[in-house]
Amino acid sequence: MLTRRSTMALGLGAAAVTIVPLKASASAVDEAVAEFTGGAAISDGGVTIIAPEIAENGENVPVEVDAPGATEIMILATGNPTPAVARVRFGEAAGAPRLATRLRLGETQEVVALAKLADGSVIRGGTEVRVTIGGCGG
Amino acid sequence: MSNVRPRIRLPRSARAGDVVQVRTLISHPMETGNRRDPDGNAIPRHIINRFTCEYDGKLVLDVDMGISVAANPYMEFDVKVDESAEFVFTWYDDDGSIYTETEHLELS
């Protein structure tokens, strides 16, 4: 039987189902990081991220990652439902381990870039981007 | 998808041994799969999931893309050019389509 209380609970449940997938859980970020590092330790520094401090439109946020010496980089939008934005493998014709692209950011969050160096070690950089209007909405 | 249009910007001139900047953009909605249409139905995910660039038969970069890449994916990167050769740019669509562009760069 549907009492008022159970109806409300149903409503709350539905709301939770709607909201939860729109935000990355810490574990989604951890999983993406682990997949990239393969368990290697991460040290801070050596990765430059250029992104606006404030993004008025989260639908289109320019982000540039530069990681001298890297063979591979991964860009993570840590506050998005699916944090892994892009994974880049550089080949022998690459002039520099650098990529500039444009991201969707659902809300204010830290954009993180990981870079794998030739010896397998992983370095990390991050920058906070304040988002005025989110870029993951419907 | 049929209305997809790649655009590529190469430097006007370059010399052997230079590192040149290449910019690419391809028109594509990059539908995330998280949105709903006005009737409340989920709009299925439809993105370009991979982009590669080769120069002179050698890999420049290979990018796996997720749903957080903005619509009309833009990529700007650096290429070491040792000889006049062809660029090959390839985009891979979720629907199985593959879009390829080639551009010749003549070094001075």
Image (spheres, rainbow, N blue to C red):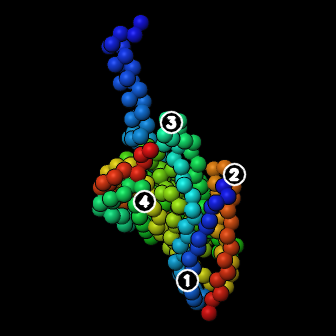
* Tags 1 and 2 on a common chain: yes
Asked if the residue under mark 4 is in contact with the one under mark 1, i.e. CB atoms within 8 Å, the reply is no
- Marks 3/2: CA distance? 27 Å
| Residue under pointer 3 | B39
First of labels 1, 3 by sequence position: 1
| Residue under pointer 2 | B96
Provide residue B77's location: percent of width, then percent of height.
52, 71
- Secondary structure beneath dot 1 equals loop
Question: What number is the disc on residue B1?
Answer: none
Provide residue A70's location: percent of width, then percent of height.
49, 65
The amino acid type, in three-letter code, at marker 2 is Gly
* Crowd tier of the residue under label 2, counting other residues whose Cα lies within 10 Å: few below 14, some 14–19, many 20 or above: few
- Marks 1/3: CA distance? 47 Å
* Crowd tier of the residue under label 1, counting other residues whose Cα lies within 10 Å: few below 14, some 14–19, many 20 or above: few
Question: What number is the disc on residue A60?
Answer: 4
User: Which quadrant would the C terminus of chain A be assigned to in this image?
Assistant: top left
Asked if the residue under mark 2 is in contact with the one under mark 1, i.e. CB atoms within 8 Å, the reply is no
**Does B27 sit above or below residue B84?**
above
The amino acid type, in three-letter code, at marker 3 is Asp
In the image, A123 versus A138, the foreground residue is: A138
- Marks 4/2: CA distance? 25 Å
The amino acid type, in three-letter code, at marker 4 is Asn
- Secondary structure beneath dot 3 equals loop
First of labels 1, 2 by sequence position: 1
| Residue under pointer 1 | B11
- Secondary structure beneath dot 4 equals loop
* Crowd tier of the residue under label 3, counting other residues whose Cα lies within 10 Å: few below 14, some 14–19, many 20 or above: few
- At horizontal 39% and vertical 20% (from top left) the residue drawn is A10
**Does B18 sit above or below residue B76?**
below
**Does B73 sit above or below residue B40?**
below
